[in-house]
Amino acid sequence: MATHCHNGPGLPVASLHEIHDCLTLALDASERPKGYTTAEREARSYMRTALRRVGKLMEGVA
């Protein structure tokens, strides 16, 4: 897969991979074994949603 291809008028595939990696790292870095506050759960939910959407965008490019 070429990383310079574009997803229509959207972002280049390389940018989508970078966003995916950053979201994954943010989720990993914020993981705690003892639970989360309500705000932390909400923020992690938004990150997981964004991660799924970026993944779907990357699937459409491949």
Image: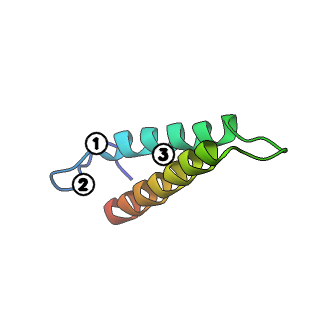
Q: Where is residue 54 in the image (x, y as percent from the top left)?
A: 41, 54
How many labels were placed on the picture? 3
Label 3 – label 1 distance at C-alpha = 16 Å
* Sequence order check, earlier mark of 2 and 3: 2
**Disc 1 crowd, CA 10 A, few/some/many (<14, 14-19, 20+):** few
Residue at image position (51%, 37%) is 22
Residue at image position (72%, 45%) is 36
Q: Position of residue 35 (x, y in %)?
A: 78, 47
Query: In this view of the protein, which residue sits in the foreground, 11 or 37?
Result: 37
Q: Where is residue 53 in the image (x, y as percent from the top left)?
A: 41, 59
Label 1 – label 2 distance at C-alpha = 10 Å
Q: Mark 2 points at which residue?
A: 7
Q: Is residue 60 above or below residue 35?
A: below
The residue type indicated by label 2 comes to: Asn
Local SS, label 3: helix
Q: Mark 3 points at which residue?
A: 20
